[in-house]
Image (cartoon, helix red, strand yellow):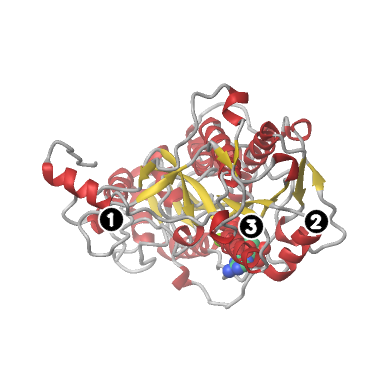
């Protein structure tokens, strides 16, 4: 969907003119101009063909639609009709800014669980070892591990992490809330940590950026590198984040299992869904992840082909009323005898009581829209005198805890390795992601400015509506 023709003088001119438009990323030499760059031996050791040149660029997006905003693109410059912005390409550099023997690296995983965390930890550790780092530790239970004296560091080595990707979860554990940035940096100083790899979502990255700034303030030569972890796929600019593909696959399996006539129980909730929805006038309400962005619900609906109604936070809907969800459910029961509703956890929050409750990290606690839809559906069918067997399924924890699938496994491998390359290259306050099919480094503030969301005017959302056949519930 890009339209680049470099033989066209107008395009060529634009490219030449905009070549310097690149997100600048902080480098250790900004604060320590005298720090010595030493030659890397990484590629020699790995017989890699070559190092990445610092001037290599990855194009963030080229869009030449008449209206990019309505094409579902992330528009950096609102109102523009096309965008070009270059990024630093990720990978090993010829010159490194840390002596491997001086490095004490730490890894921390924060926020909620997400498939692939162990894969990323594993590749950070193994890549650090190839650089020659001997001192790598894991901070247990997120940022909390920096301040809780009862949580000792976990020494990490290739031997320790060899098989951790075979199970889900995080070897190090996760948490929300915890110490202040000052306390974290105090603890880093005490422990002598000069490379910090932070795996987490928007909150974790806000923390990582604050840690980076605090280190600069204290004139500590530290590289802080993030690896974005969001199962919701709501981090800006990135094609996708790790765990998302696995989540879609698992959720799709759960929904589709309803249609298996035979087949063994998987020993998980999927068998429960099958049993429930093959019931007479069975209605399954499946809640999936997606606090502010409905990517998982949308992709699962597209992938499974069995979802009749997909509800996401970005698209308001009426439950009651002549054009509401409940009326459509009745139509589905009359015409096909069963229905599946797939709802993202952040959808329809206006129907629920706002408790103003916050979790330990300060995130708003959402009401349970799945339970609400189940209750309202039951009530509605009772009122109209039509029998309906309404079941609510919440496979979110099962999905969060599975191990990464093959495509996420590969993504985690590349992200983990590139995080280490970025730190050795002297960058700090950065994160790494796949962008336009290439791996790139970005300044943290650019990716956490706001959450990426599904554009209701995008082709993808319309494809989803075409697939489910659902009307506008307005
Ligand atoms: P998830 O996608 O699972 O929600 P997250 O990284 O957004 O991941 P949070 O629980 O919001 O998860 O935050 C993780 C950690 O980052 C917590 O320990 C929290 O205290 C810290 N944190 C959150 N926001 C900030 C911030 N603005 N500045 C410093 N630290 C923060
Ligand atoms: Mg978050």
Give the percent coordinates (x, y) of residue 193.
74, 53
Q: Pick whichever, 88 or 230, lies toward us.
A: 88
> Which mark, residue 471?
1
Give the percent coordinates (x, y) of residue 414.
54, 36
Rendered residue at 44%/64% (across/down): 450
Q: Label 2 CB, ligand 1: below 8 Å? A: no
Rendered residue at 71%/64% (across/down): 185
**Extreme residue in the top direction:** 47
User: Crowdedness of circle 1 by 10 Å Cα count: few (<14), some, many (20+)?
Assistant: few
**Extreme residue in the left direction:** 9
Residue on which the image places disc 2: 191
Give the percent coordinates (x, y) of residue 287.
52, 53
Foreground label between 3 and 1: 3
Asked which quadrant contains residue 110, the reply is bottom right
Quadrant including the C terminus? bottom left
Residue on which the image places disc 3: 111
Q: Label 3 CB, ligand 1: below 8 Å? A: yes
Task: From the viewer's perspective, tell me whether residue 291 is left or right of residue 100.
Answer: left
Inter-mark Cα distance, 2 to 3: 23 Å
Whether residue 117 is visible here, answered yes or no, is yes
Kind of element beneath mark 1: loop
């Amino acid at each position: 969907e890009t339209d680049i023709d470099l033989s066209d003088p107008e395009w060529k001119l634009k490219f030449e003119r905009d070549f310097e438009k690149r997100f600048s990323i902080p480098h250790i030499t900004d604060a320590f101009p005298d720090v010595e760059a030493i030659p890397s031996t990484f590629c020699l050791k790995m017989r890699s063909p070559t190092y990445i040149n610092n001037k290599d660029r990855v194009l963030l997006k080229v869009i030449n639609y008449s209206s990019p905003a309505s094409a579902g693109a992330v528009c950096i410059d609102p109102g523009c009709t096309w965008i070009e912005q270059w990024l630093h390409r990720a990978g090993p550099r010829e010159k490194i800014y840390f002596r491997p023997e001086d490095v004490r690296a730490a890894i921390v995983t924060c926020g909620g669980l997400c498939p692939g965390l162990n894969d990323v930890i594993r590749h950070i550790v193994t890549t650090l070892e190839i650089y020659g780092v001997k001192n790598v530790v894991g901070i247990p239970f997120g940022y909390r591990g920096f301040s809780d004296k009862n949580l000792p560091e976990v020494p990490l080595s290739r031997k320790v992490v060899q098989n951790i990707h075979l199970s889900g979860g995080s070897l190090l554990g996760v948490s929300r809330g915890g110490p202040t940035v000052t306390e974290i940096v105090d603890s880093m100083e005490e422990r002598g940590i000069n490379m910090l790899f932070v795996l987490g979502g928007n909150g974790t990255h806000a923390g990582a950026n604050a840690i980076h700034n605090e280190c600069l303030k204290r004139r500590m030569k530290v590289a802080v590198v993030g690896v974005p972890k969001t199962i919701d796929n709501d981090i800006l600019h990135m094609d996708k984040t790790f765990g998302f593909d696995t989540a879609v696959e698992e959720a799709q399996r759960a929904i589709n299992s309803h249609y298996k006539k035979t087949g063994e129980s998987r020993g998980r909730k999927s068998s429960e869904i099958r049993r429930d929805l093959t019931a007479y006038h069975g209605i399954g309400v499946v809640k999936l992840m997606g606090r502010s962005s409905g990517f998982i619900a949308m992709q699962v609906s597209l992938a499974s082909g069995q979802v009749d109604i997909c509800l996401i936070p970005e698209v308001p809907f009426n439950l009651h009323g002549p054009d509401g969800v409940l009326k459509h459910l009745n139509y589905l029961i009359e015409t096909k005898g069963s229905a599946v509703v797939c709802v993202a956890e952040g959808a329809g929050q206006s129907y629920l009581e706002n408790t103003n409750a916050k979790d330990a990290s300060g995130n708003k606690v959402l009401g349970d829209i799945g339970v609400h839809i189940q209750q309202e559906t039951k009530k509605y069918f009772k009122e109209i005198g039509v029998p309906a067997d309404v079941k609510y399924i919440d496979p979110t924890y099962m999905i969060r805890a599975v191990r990464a699938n093959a495509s996420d496994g590969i993504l985690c491998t590349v992200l983990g390795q590139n995080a280490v390359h970025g730190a050795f290259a002297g960058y700090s306050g950065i994160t790494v992601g796949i962008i336009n099919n290439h791996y790139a480094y970005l300044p943290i503030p650019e990716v956490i400015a706001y959450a990426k969301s599904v554009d209701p005017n995008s082709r993808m959302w319309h494809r989803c509506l075409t697939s489910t056949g659902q009307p506008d519930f307005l």
